[in-house]
Image: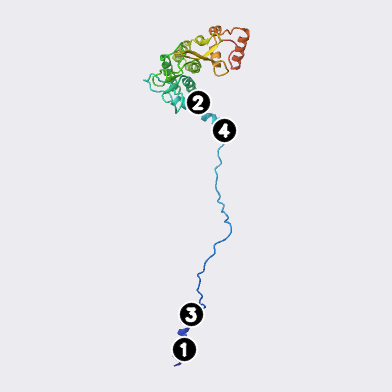
């Protein structure tokens, strides 16, 4: 009997230790929760590594612009050797596709010289391009040696009913003469022929002693270069005595003015002779 009581007590103790803790009547046991932090969140700084930029020098900028300018004249030219417009260069990009500017050709001929000196292209590449371009120019329509401002880049014919332009012809001649002096030989001969064909006095308004601005076969002359602008190259480059005689420029005051202008631009202090 005593053994049964002892066994009963031991079993009671074991089972009572494994049962959940008793709660008061009406109470429920709540789960344990963790409260979220209150107050503003503090951002965590993440360290970043910033590369120090390489400073750009003015020489880098000039070189970048120079190469980009050369690329335009070299890449936007008509390079079809069988085309009547070989060597003609677009007036602009990307607009006006198929339209060349005669002034753009003059800038391009000068750019080719720069390209050789800077190592962008070879001497032979520039020679061939310039030589072919001058052949195109010699075959194009002209009026008293002056070129139309805008032409078809493939045919070399007048475009947009454009004017015969003395200023654009002058810009062209700057490139033509530069190419002639740089390359020499047959290119120089062609350059001199193109320049010699231009009848500069024909474009002078004798009543005002100055160049007209434009000429259209359908309308005649229009406008005057009566203000300070790029037309100064026409006076510096082309004022031979025969031109000056048409412009009443042989007064002492006029000649001294031209001499001072020539000295300013690095030319000898004399009026060019024919």
Q: Nearer the viewer, mark 2 or mark 1?
A: 1
Q: Residue at x 54, y 31 (%)?
A: 61
Mark 3 secondary-structure assignment = helix
Numbered mark located on residue 57 in the image: 4
Q: Residue at x 61, y 17 (%)?
A: 264
Q: Tag 2 or tag 4, which sits nearer the N-term?
A: 4
Q: Tag 2 or tag 3, which sits nearer the N-term?
A: 3
Snapshot quadrant of residue 231: top right
Q: Residue at x 61, y 12 (%)?
A: 257
Q: CA distance from mark 3 to mark 2?
A: 98 Å
Say if 187 sits above or below 40 in the image. Answer: above
Q: Nearer the viewer, mark 4 or mark 1?
A: 1
Q: Position of residue 17 (x, y in %)?
A: 48, 80
Q: Which residue is mark 3?
A: 17
Q: Nearer the viewer, residue 58 or 38?
A: 38
Q: Tag 3 or tag 4, which sits nearer the N-term?
A: 3
Tag 4 and tag 3, C-beta contact below 8 Å: no
Q: Nearer the viewer, residue 151 or 60?
A: 151
Q: Which residue is mark 2?
A: 118
**Around disc 4, counting alpha carbons within 10 Å, would you say few (fewer than 14), some (14 to 19), or many (20 or more)?**
few
Q: Nearer the viewer, mark 1 or mark 3?
A: 3
The answer, for residue 120, to whether it is visible in the render is no
Q: Tag 1 or tag 2, which sits nearer the N-term?
A: 1
Q: Nearer the viewer, mark 3 or mark 2?
A: 3
Mark 1 secondary-structure assignment = helix
Q: Position of residue 2 (x, y in %)?
A: 46, 92
């Amino acid at each position: 009997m005593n053994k049964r009581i002892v066994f009963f007590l031991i079993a009671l103790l074991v089972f009572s230790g494994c049962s959940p803790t008793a709660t008061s009547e009406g109470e429920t046991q709540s789960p344990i929760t963790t409260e979220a932090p209150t107050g503003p969140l503090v951002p965590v700084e993440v360290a970043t590594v910033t590369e120090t930029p390489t400073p750009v020098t003015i020489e880098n900028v000039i070189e970048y612009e120079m190469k980009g300018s050369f690329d335009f004249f070299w890449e936007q030219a008509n390079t079809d050797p069988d085309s009547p417009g070989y060597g003609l260069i677009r007036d602009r990009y990307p607009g006006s596709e198929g339209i060349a500017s005669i002034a753009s050709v003059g800038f391009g001929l000068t750019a080719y010289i720069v390209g050789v000196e800077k190592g962008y292209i070879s001497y032979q590449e520039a020679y061939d391009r310039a030589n072919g371009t001058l052949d195109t120019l010699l075959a194009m329509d002209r009026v008293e040696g002056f070129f139309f401002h805008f032409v078809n880049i493939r045919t070399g014919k007048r475009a947009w009913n454009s004017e015969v332009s003395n200023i654009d012809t002058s810009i062209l001649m700057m490139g033509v003469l530069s190419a002639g002096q740089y390359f020499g030989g047959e290119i120089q001969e062609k350059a001199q022929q193109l320049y010699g064909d231009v009848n500069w006095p024909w474009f002078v308004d004798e009543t005002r002693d100055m160049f007209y601005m434009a000429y259209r076969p359908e309308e005649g002359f229009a406008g005057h270069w009566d203000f300070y602008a790029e037309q100064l190259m026409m006076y510096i480059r082309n004022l031979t005595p025969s031109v000056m005689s048409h412009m009443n420029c042989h007064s002492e005051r006029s000649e001294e003015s031209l001499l001072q202008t020539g000295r300013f631009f690095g030319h000898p202090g004399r009026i060019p002779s024919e």
